[in-house]
Image (spheres, coloured by chain):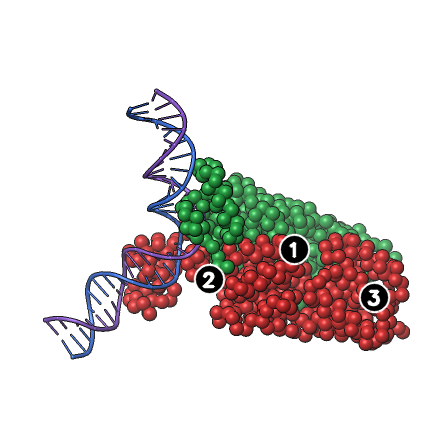
Chain colours: A green, B red, C purple, D blue
DNA sequence: CTGATTTATGAAAAAGGTTTCTTTAAAAGA
DNA sequence: TCTTTTAAAGAAACCTTTTTCATAAATCAG
C-alpha cells in the first residue's frame, strides 16, 4: 500500500518517466505516444491508484492550485459563510484553499503572508487588517494575483470587492428616522478601516440631512465580549434619551442586544435596533431584528472570479477595480414605526 | 524583489549550499561551521529576507508542518468555532492547517483525502461522513497520524474525541420530564452516524425510564432548510399533543424554532424546547433557549494534542483511544417548569 | 615526523515531478 | 537511392532543499 511514484510506474513498465508523464498529463497525442503505450500506462496507473505528489509538481511548475484565504475570524458567521462559498467556487474550478484567521493583527498577518508565499499559493483573497499596506503593495509588485474584500486600501491599486457601506449605513439610519426615532446612536468600532469609516459617514450624513444630533460611541477593537456588553450598557444608561441604535458590526450587535436586554428596554418600543450583518437567527428573534445583509454569495464568487481571472490571464489587466455590491436592508420588527410609536 | 533561493545566497557569498543550509537550520555548531561564516550567512540571509521554499523542503523531508482538517460545513457555528480553536492551537505549535467542508458527502471526502495525501499533510483531524470507513482504515494502515472528532467508527481503532452523546441526550430529555412535559418529541436526522444514534438512544432511555411514549421524527439528511421548516411544522401540526421537543442538531433546531414560530406556539408554555449545540444568540432569545453545549475548546485542543502526539512520537501508541468529554446542559427559559406549567 | 583526528567546507544524491533536447527508426519526398 | 520528415520514446536538466559522503587543512598523539 506504499505510495507509488511516477518513477515506479516507469520502471515497472520499462518505459521512461517522460513517457509516463506525458500520458498522465494528457499530452500523449501531441507528443506522438502510441495508442497502445498510452493505454498500457493509463491502465496501470489506475490499477495502482497513482496520485502525483503535488509538492513535486508545484515545485517544478510553480503552480500549486492553492488559493490563500485570510479572514478576520473564521468563527464569525459573516466570514465563515464567505469562506464556505469561496471554497465551493474554488473547488469547482480545481482549486483548493488554505485559510487562516488574522485576528485583525498585522503582525500575525505578515507572518501568515510569508508562510503562504513560501508555500507558493497561486493567489490571495484577503480581508486585510489595518497596517499591512506595505505587504499588500509588495504582493502587488511581485505580480501575485490578489483580491481584497470587505475592506481595502484606497491608495493601493488592488482588485477589491465590497458592499456600498456608505449608502447602506445611510439607508439604515434613514430607515430609523422614517420610523420616528429621534435620538439615534451609532455604535461602532474604533477603527480606521475604510468599511467602518464609510458606515460612520453614512450614518452622519443621514443625521445631518434630518438635522438630528450625532450620538457616536466607538468601542476599542480588541475589547472582550463581556466588556463590550458592559460598555454599551453604561453608554445607554448614561444617555437615556437615545431611542434607537445602529450597530456597525454583528459582534457589537450581539453585545448590544445583551445590554439592551439587561437594561430591560423593550425593542422596538423603547429602543429601535438595526444591525450591520444579518445573522441566521435574527429572523427568529422576538422581535425579529432588522439587519443590513451583505450579499455573501456574490461577494465570494466575485472575489473568486476576479482572482481566477488574474491567475489565468497572467494578471496585469483587470486589477485596480473596486467592485461595489449593494447590501439589502431587511426591515424586520426591531425598527418598525407602527410598533415603535403606537 | 524576486524571491531569493538558498542557491542564490550560496553563489552570492561564494560558499556551498550545504553550508548555507546548515547555518540557516541552526546546525552550524554541530557541523563545525566557523563563527565568522555563520554570522556572514545569517546576516546576509536576513538582509535579503530569505524564506525557504516550503514545497522543496516538504518534498525533501517529508514533513510539511501542515494539518488537514475536514469538517462537515465550515459555515456551521459548531464546526467553525472548533476549527478556529484548532487553528489557534496548531499555529502555536508551528503548524498550519488546510481545511475543507465535506458536506457529509463520502465521494467528495474521498477526493479531498487524496488531495491532502498528495500534498503530504502531516496529519488529519476529521469529522467523518458516513461511508468512508475503508479510507479511514487505510489512512490508519499507512501510518498517517489521524484523529476523528464529533463522530467515529466504533470498529476502527482510531483516536477519537467526542462528547458523551448518550448521557447528554438522556439528561436533556430527563430535564424536560422534570419540568412536567409529558409528550416529548425527538427530532433528529435520519442518519446512522454514531453520535446521532447515541443521542437517539439517550432520548429513548429517558422516555422508557419515565414510561413515556417515544415520538421520533427523522429528517432526511440533505433536506434543504425551507423544507425542514415545513416538515417540522407539519409534524407538530399533526401531533398537537406534543408539548416539548428535543432537537438533535442546531440545524434542525433553527428550522424547528421557525416552525414553532409559524404555528404560533408559545415557548415554553405550549412547547418546551431543548436544542443540541448551543449557539451564540440562544442566550439572547426571548425566551432564551435551553441547549446542550459541547465543550468546543476542549474538543479542539484535545484533538490537536492527540494528533501532535502521534506525529512527534512516531505514532503507533496512543491510538485507539476515545476521549469522551462531558457536555453541559444550559438550562434556560425555553424549558423551565415554573414557566411551563404555572 | 608520521599517522590519526578534528575542523571547516563542498560535491553530489535524493525527493518526485515536468520539460527540453536527443536519438532511433520508419515514412515520405526528390 | 539519398535526404528530409515524422513518429515514438528516452536522457538529462531543472525546481529547491536536505543530507550523506568526501576532501583538504589543521591539530594532536606518540
> Label 3: few (<14), some or many (≥20) within 10 Å?
some
Q: Are marks 1 and 3 in contact (CB under 8 Å)?
A: no
Residue A69 image offset from top left, x and y in percent: 56, 54
Chain letter for mark 1? B
Residue that appears at 50% across and 48% down: A44
Q: Which mark is residue B105?
A: 1
Mark pair 2, 1: CA separation = 29 Å
Write down the chain letter for disc 3: B
Q: Is residue C27 left or right of residue A265?
A: left
Residue indicated by mark 3: B215
Q: Is residue A67 left or right of residue D20?
A: right
* Residue named by callout 2: B63
Identify the secondary structure beneath mark 2. loop
Measure the C-alpha gap from mark 2 to mark 3: 52 Å
Disc 3 on helix, strand or loop?
A: strand
Is the residue under label 3 in contact with that under label 2 (CB below 8 Å)?
A: no
**Whole-percent x, y for residue A282 in the image:** 75, 58
Front label number (2 vs 1): 1
Q: Looking at the image, is mark 2 or mark 3 earlier in the sequence?
A: 2
Chain containing mark 2: B
In the displayed structure, A198 sits above or below C27; it is below
Amino acid at each position: 500500500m506504499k505510495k507509488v511514484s511516477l518513477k515506479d510506474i516507469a520502471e515497472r513498465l520499462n518505459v521512461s518517466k517522460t513517457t509516463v508523464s506525458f500520458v498522465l498529463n494528457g499530452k500523449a497525442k501531441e507528443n506522438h505516444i502510441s495508442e497502445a503505450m498510452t493505454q498500457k500506462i493509463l491502465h496501470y496507473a489506475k490499477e495502482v491508484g497513482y496520485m502525483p505528489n503535488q509538492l513535486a509538481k508545484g515545485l517544478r511548475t510553480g503552480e500549486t492550485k492553492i488559493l490563500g484565504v485570510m479572514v478576520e475570524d473564521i468563527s464569525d458567521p459573516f466570514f465563515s459563510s464567505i469562506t464556505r462559498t469561496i471554497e465551493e467556487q474554488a473547488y469547482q474550478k480545481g482549486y483548493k484553499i488554505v485559510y487562516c484567521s488574522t485576528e485583525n493583527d498585522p503582525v500575525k498577518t505578515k507572518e501568515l503572508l510569508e508562510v503562504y508565499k513560501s508555500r507558493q499559493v497561486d493567489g490571495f483573497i484577503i480581508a486585510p487588517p489595518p497596517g499591512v499596506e506595505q505587504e499588500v503593495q509588495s504582493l502587488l509588485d511581485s505580480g501575485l494575483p490578489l483580491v481584497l474584500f470587505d475592506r481595502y486600501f484606497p491608495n493601493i491599486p488592488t482588485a477589491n470587492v465590497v458592499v456600498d457601506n456608505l449608502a447602506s449605513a445611510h439607508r439604515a439610519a434613514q430607515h430609523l428616522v422614517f420610523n420616528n426615532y429621534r435620538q439615534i446612536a451609532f455604535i461602532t468600532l474604533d477603527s480606521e478601516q475604510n468599511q467602518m469609516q464609510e458606515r460612520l459617514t453614512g450614518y452622519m450624513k443621514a443625521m445631518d440631512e434630518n438635522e438630528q444630533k450625532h450620538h457616536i460611541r466607538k468601542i476599542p477593537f480588541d475589547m472582550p465580549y463581556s466588556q463590550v456588553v458592559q460598555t454599551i450598557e453604561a453608554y445607554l444608561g448614561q444617555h437615556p434619551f437615545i431611542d434607537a441604535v445602529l450597530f456597525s458590526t454583528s459582534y457589537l450587535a450581539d453585545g448590544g442586544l445583551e445590554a439592551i436586554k439587561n437594561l430591560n428596554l423593550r425593542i422596538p418600543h423603547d429602543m429601535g435596533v438595526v444591525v450591520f450583518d444579518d445573522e441566521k437567527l435574527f429572523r427568529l428573534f422576538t422581535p425579529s431584528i432588522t439587519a443590513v445583509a451583505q450579499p455573501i454569495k456574490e461577494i465570494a464568487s466575485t472575489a473568486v472570479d476576479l482572482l481566477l481571472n488574474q491567475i489565468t490571464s497572467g494578471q496585469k489587466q483587470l486589477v485596480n477595480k473596486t467592485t461595489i455590491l449593494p447590501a439589502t436592508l431587511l426591515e424586520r420588527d426591531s425598527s418598525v414605526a407602527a410598533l415603535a410609536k403606537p
